[in-house]
Image (cartoon, coloured by chain):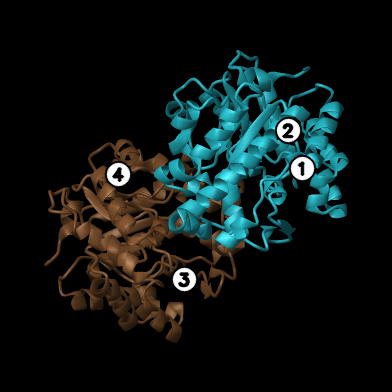
Chain colours: A cyan, B brown
């Protein structure tokens, strides 16, 4: 691997500077992405390995990040499980038949992931070839809890009350769905690793909606099963947005690194995670709207606060569509210019 | 005062059991509230002291909470500042002309609060009379940052990116707006206290969208000015949703109590706030969907975790419209049945 900074950081090795990548780095802020978006709908882009590969490579070539992350979506796992998912303009993900009853749950299958999701594995293989060992390739999946949120609520939501309602009114049904998602996700990620993913990131985007005790009941046990299942294969990064209260458990789970959102300071994150594990984050995506000199100053402060080792520079959540490309590039450049 | 449990808890006195009230306790889960809602629109209910009084008293008589909170809205302060606010079905608060330019900011006035908001003070006086010293009456206001979110974004939002954009792109303009809101809020709350409010609660509903350093820049200094201005008059409760990272500063501010949301455990809340100050919270509002026996068990566990003294039982955010009345009542009853 020509640039293996990410892998070094995940092994807690001493580095010249920390690696940097951005969640949603192949996204709507990139003009070339928008050109493809006009021509092909969302799932066509996901399901066509040539398109997914082309999109995945854009930020490597144009922004200069230290890792690629395969262009896909966490909801493809639900699709494979016989849950229809659409991407609607102005709404985002939309599930016409939400899994909010036992009858609906009966329709949810444990799929053969190679039959249903080979387009993802093919995209991984193709991207690995095109990358030609320039930087590592990250594969990913959603946490079972986060996928349940969409499957039950039917679309995105500020607080996913209907998803939480199922958990609190029908906990056994919720746990059955969580377990099926977990089994499918493990099979899916094993194939992704077989296809060539060097690192896996797990996204618990809605974990922060649960109380710490409910997180222990409805999210963490399922995430932990996935981390365990991947143990010994590739490094796993666990990112739970708003899950500062779970950093201690996560740090002891066998994960190689933990993602941190911008509401948790470097100091708190190091304290809560025990000070040893590699951390990743946590620039407020909105802060990329600041003038470029201020972005550069804040990135330097952030690296100083986390420390250059056992650290992966990233945003605290996905990059926003309205960020100017030169601001995104300034963020990455600031890391490359870093002198401790 | 016949039932002064709330005031005792705010003075850190030893109590038989903790007091209990619920954010949005006079809300849509109450059938009598829905009857009034069908007849009068939102701001008519706010602006008619007889209606505001009737609504404020409903949960005292029907649910048996230990405090009343005046029925009103945090956005009446923006209205007084010459910012038009509507309440639209399916959208919620809507500001037709958001304050997203210097020209818009020029239209924002520092009002005479008695001229513009006397209906609130009249509702407080009328409610005090009707309450006849049964329980204390809480007055409230939004944090300047939370009001800026609505004023700039123009409506509610998952992440208030446009409001944050103004702060990061035009910080001086944002701070000018924050300062004007602060000045108006101080005048407003002083009049509310003069009218008879026994306690003031400040709601920073969107504080948790900021990083700790941005919270220090765009929210906390303005909240602190309000706490200082009320010092020596009535006890102030500061509730910042998602603001666990600021509990230490808040605990040293002169506030009498701090509100806690459900993502911060009792143990973390006591630790972060230094262990001395009265805390209020933090039952997940969605958890009121659980079966009644489970609600009662969890309330007992919550009181044991916080401790019965220096503690006010509440939800971690407002009660949801779809909560059955008997579940809300079970929550309150569980506190009254508490035996340490």
Q: Mark 1 points at which residue?
A: A117
CB atoms of marks 2 and 4 within 8 Å: no
Q: Is residue A144 above or below residue A231?
A: below
Q: For the residue labelled by badge 3, is the local secondary structure a helix, a strand or a loop?
A: helix
Residue A257 at x, y percent in the picture? 57, 27
Q: In which quadrant of the rendered view does residue B275 lie?
A: top left
Measured in 3D between alpha carbons, the distance from the residue under mark 3 to the one under mark 2, in whole angstroms, is: 57 Å
Q: In which quadrant of the rendered view does residue B111 lie?
A: bottom left
Residue B177 at x, y percent in the picture? 50, 57
Q: For the residue carrying disc 2, how many other residues have a C-alpha within 10 Å: few (<14), some (14-19), or many (20+)?
A: some
Measured in 3D between alpha carbons, the distance from the residue under mark 2 to the one under mark 4, in whole angstroms, is: 54 Å
CB atoms of marks 1 and 4 within 8 Å: no
Q: For the residue carrying disc 3, how many other residues have a C-alpha within 10 Å: few (<14), some (14-19), or many (20+)?
A: some
Q: Is residue A56 above or below residue B104?
A: above
Q: Name the residue under label 4.
A: B253
Residue B311 at x, y percent in the picture? 23, 49
Measured in 3D between alpha carbons, the distance from the residue under mark 2 to the one under mark 1, in whole angstroms, is: 9 Å
**Is disc 2 in the same subunit as disc 1?**
yes
Q: Which chain carries label 1?
A: A
Q: Name the residue under label 3.
A: B79
CB atoms of marks 3 and 2 within 8 Å: no
**B272 lies left or right of B304:** right
Q: Residue at x 81, y 41 (%)?
A: A119
Q: For the residue labelled by badge 2, is the local secondary structure a helix, a strand or a loop?
A: helix
Q: For the residue labelled by badge 4, is the local secondary structure a helix, a strand or a loop?
A: loop
Measured in 3D between alpha carbons, the distance from the residue under mark 1 to the one under mark 3, in whole angstroms, is: 53 Å
């Amino acid at each position: 691997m020509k640039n293996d900074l990410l892998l070094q950081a995940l092994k807690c090795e001493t580095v010249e500077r920390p690696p940097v990548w951005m969640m949603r780095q192949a996204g709507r802020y990139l003009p070339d992405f928008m050109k493809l978006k006009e021509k092909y709908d969302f799932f066509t882009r996901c399901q066509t390995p040539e398109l997914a590969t082309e999109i995945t490579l854009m930020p490597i070539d144009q922004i200069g990040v230290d890792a690629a992350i395969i262009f896909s979506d966490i909801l493809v796992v639900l699709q494979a499980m016989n849950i229809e998912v659409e991407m609607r303009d102005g709404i985002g993900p939309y599930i016409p038949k939400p899994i909010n009853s036992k009858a609906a749950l009966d329709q949810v299958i444990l799929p053969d992931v190679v039959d249903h999701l080979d387009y993802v594995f093919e995209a991984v293989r193709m991207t690995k070839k095109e990358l030609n060992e320039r930087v590592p390739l990250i594969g990913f999946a959603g946490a079972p809890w986060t996928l349940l949120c969409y499957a039950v609520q039917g679309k995105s939501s500020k607080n996913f009350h209907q998803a939480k309602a199922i958990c609190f009114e029908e906990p056994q049904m919720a746990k059955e769905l969580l377990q099926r998602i977990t089994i499918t996700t493990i099979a899916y990620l094993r194939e992704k690793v077989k296809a060539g993913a060097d690192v896996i990131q797990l996204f618990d985007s809605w974990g922060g909606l649960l109380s710490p005790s409910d997180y222990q009941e409805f999210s963490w046990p399922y995430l932990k099963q996935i981390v365990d299942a991947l143990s010994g294969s590739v490094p796993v990064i666990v990112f739970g947005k708003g899950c500062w209260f779970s950093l201690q458990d996560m740090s002891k789970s066998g994960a190689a690194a933990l993602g941190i959102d911008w509401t948790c300071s470097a100091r708190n994150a190091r304290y809560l995670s025990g000070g040893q594990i590699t951390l990743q984050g946590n620039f407020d995506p909105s802060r990329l709207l600041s003038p470029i000199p201020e972005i550069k100053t804040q990135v330097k402060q952030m690296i100083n606060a986390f420390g250059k080792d056992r650290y992966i520079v990233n945003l605290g959540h996905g990059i926003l569509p309205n960020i100017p490309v030169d601001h995104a590039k300034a963020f990455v450049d600031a890391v490359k210019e870093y002198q401790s």
